[in-house]
Amino acid sequence: MGPYPVVDTAGQTSLWVEQPGARRTKQHLDDVRLARPGNTAQHPAHDEPPDPPASTPEPTAGPSWAQD
C-alpha cells in the first residue's frame, strides 16, 4: 500500500487531504484515485460516466438502477 488514505470499494472517496498543496476538483481527485499505483484499471475517458456520479447524490439504499 502507499501513503494514501483509505477509499472503500463503494467509491466513496476520502481524498480531500490526499496530497498537500494539491487543491483540485473532486473529478481530479477521482482521477488521482483511479490512477494510483497498483490500480490496474485504465484511466477513464472524461466522456464516460464517473464512478460514482459525483454530481448526483445517490441514496444509500443501493445503486440507482436497482430502484424502479
Image (cartoon, rainbow, N blue to C red):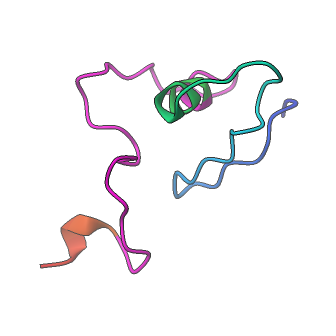
Q: Position of residue 55 (x, y in %)?
A: 34, 47
Quadrant hosting residue 43 = top left
Q: Residue at the left extreme?
A: 68
Q: Residue at x 76, y 48 (%)?
A: 6
- Counting every numbered tag in the picture gives 0
Q: What segment is highlighted magenta in the picture?
A: 33-62
Q: In this view, does 62 lie above or below 26?
A: below
Q: Which of 37 and 46 is in front in this view?
A: 46
Q: Where is residue 5 in the image (x, y as percent from the top left)?
A: 79, 42
Q: Where is residue 25 in the image (x, y as percent from the top left)?
A: 53, 29
Residue 37 on the magenta span: yes
Q: Is residue 19 above or below residue 64?
A: above
Q: Position of residue 27 (x, y in %)?
A: 46, 30
Q: Which residue is drawn at 67% across and 24% down?
A: 23
Q: Which of 40 and 48 is in front in this view?
A: 48
Q: In this view, does 24 lie to the left or right of 50?
A: right
Q: Is residue 35 left or right of residue 18?
A: left
| On-image quarter of the C terminus | bottom left
Quadrant hosting residue 37 = top right
Q: Residue at x 37, y 23 (%)?
A: 44
| On-image quarter of the N terminus | top right
Q: Is residue 35 above or below residue 55?
A: above
Main secondary structure along the magenta-highlighted residues: loop
Residue 55 on the magenta span: yes
Q: Nearer the viewer, residue 6 or 17?
A: 17
